[in-house]
Image (tube, rainbow, N blue to C red):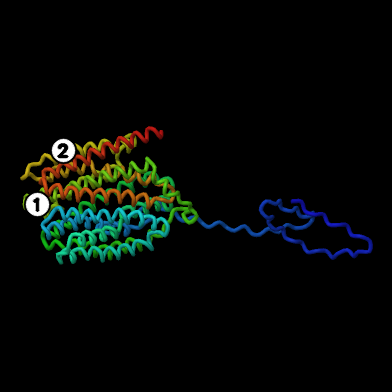
Amino acid sequence: MRQPTPAADGPGTTAPAPARPAPTLPAPAGHPAPTPPAGRPVLTPPTPTPPAPAQLAPSLVRATGWGYYPVAALARLPFAMVVVGVLTYVATVTGSVALGGLASGAVGVGVVLAGPVVGALVDRHGQRPVVPVVGLLNAGAVALVPLVVGADANVPTVVAVAFLAGATVPQVAPLSRTRLVTIVGARVVPQRRVSTFAHVMSYESAVDETAFVVGPVVVGALAAWVAPWLPLVVAAALSLTAVVAFALHPTASVRAPGHAGEVRAPLREIVRARVLVVVGGAFAVGLFFGTTLTSLTAFMAEQGRGDGAGLVYGAMGLTSAVLALGVALLPRAFAPRWRWVVFGAAIVVSSTLYAGLGPDASAVGALLLMGIGVGPVLVTVLSMTSSRSPQGRAATTMTLTTAALALAQAVASAVTGQLAEVHGASAAMVLPLASAVLLVVLGLVNAALERRAA
């Protein structure tokens, strides 16, 4: 806007005293800055010095510190132990695999309903304010299960308490994965980020698989050698200690660059085919886990060794963890979409062997072969979840995927337990094969979606 020209001094007016030089101020938005008269100095405010960038680390371990990893590993165990622990305890105390499957199914339903809510709270407020509360609530809920079941409570009460234990179980795995991915982007030197991200996904999946090994093994050992209620007490103690320590670790304060002003994508962005097919893949993996664990429990119960099912189930997790770590070594030409299909087919083959086991056979060999396919598939599905998460919805998407896995495991446990009770373990042992076939079909759907998007 043009500045008005001062009127000339009229007759008889006194010339004004020379004015002090006025600083030139920034013009209002939408207006050009006034040009100072010749000879007047231009005073500008000092330019603020930009803050020094945060020091970047050459590796993820340097950015997090070694202490983070054992804490995060231990904090995963309550999630890995609760489903198996509830199934083992209820089935052992009541003598009913069907009720055990129903109770463990209620745990999974609780995980599914609460998981996305916790993920959304974490996306909004961060992990540090949310996770300790969840850990404390879970400790109380899990400790309540043996008290209620041991008091001969009715079925609805047992299911309700199991649901509460699932609704409060800390989902450390997706939170740790989201935390490390954020640290890779915020604290690791740029030239190392791509390779570090690949190693993070493999490492996290391997730790998840290790938890799936250690959790059932701990449950089986404590239940068989000490008392069936002890695994649940240990899980509650870990929620009080390891989960809270994970939440309060210094890495929990790291946010992605620009996080404070970041606009989160609307929730409807999660309901897209490329995201939902990955969630479906996790659901199929959960079906496989639930049908395998419950049918194995029924199979070993018929052999008189039902309380040791967790120990045998750990065989699958052993090979699964090793193969999950090896995914980072696979050539890039072996695209993730084909890894899903190929390793899913390996699960189909091993599940066929498992379904054909005789009544006196050992299931260890079949479970070891199952793990060869499960580990790489789980790494692939979770890596796709991270890469396809809408902006600002990483924790929500990851917990949704984990919740889908838990829901499937819950539904599968309940259905498989009922089938085993009515038709015997041999009928229930066919269900892992059906889950594996579904997993391969979803892998082919994902490959078609990627080809269409290319």
- For image coordinates 74% across by 53% down, the residue present is 34
Image-quadrant location for residue 275: top left
Residue 303 at x, y percent in the picture: 6, 50
Q: Which residue is mark 1?
A: 301
Asked if the residue under mark 2 is in contact with the one under mark 1, i.e. CB atoms within 8 Å, the reply is: no
The reply to whether residue 240 is visible in this rendering is yes
Tell me the kind of residue under disc 2: Thr
How many badges with numbers are in the image? Answer: 2
Which quadrant would the C terminus be assigned to in this image? Answer: top left
Q: Nearer the viewer, residue 197 or 368?
A: 368
Q: Nearer the viewer, residue 102 or 454?
A: 102
Image-quadrant location for residue 175: bottom left
| 10 Å crowding of disc 2: few (<14), some (14-19), many (20+) | some
Image-quadrant location for residue 282: top left
- For image coordinates 34% across by 61% down, the residue present is 131
Q: Nearer the viewer, residue 437 or 331?
A: 437
Describe residue 20's horizontal placement relative to residue 382 as left or right.
right
Residue 453 against residue 74 in the figure, above or below: above
Marked residue nearer the N-terminal end (1 or 2): 1
Real-space CA distance between mark 1 and mark 2, rounded to the nearest whole angstrom: 21 Å
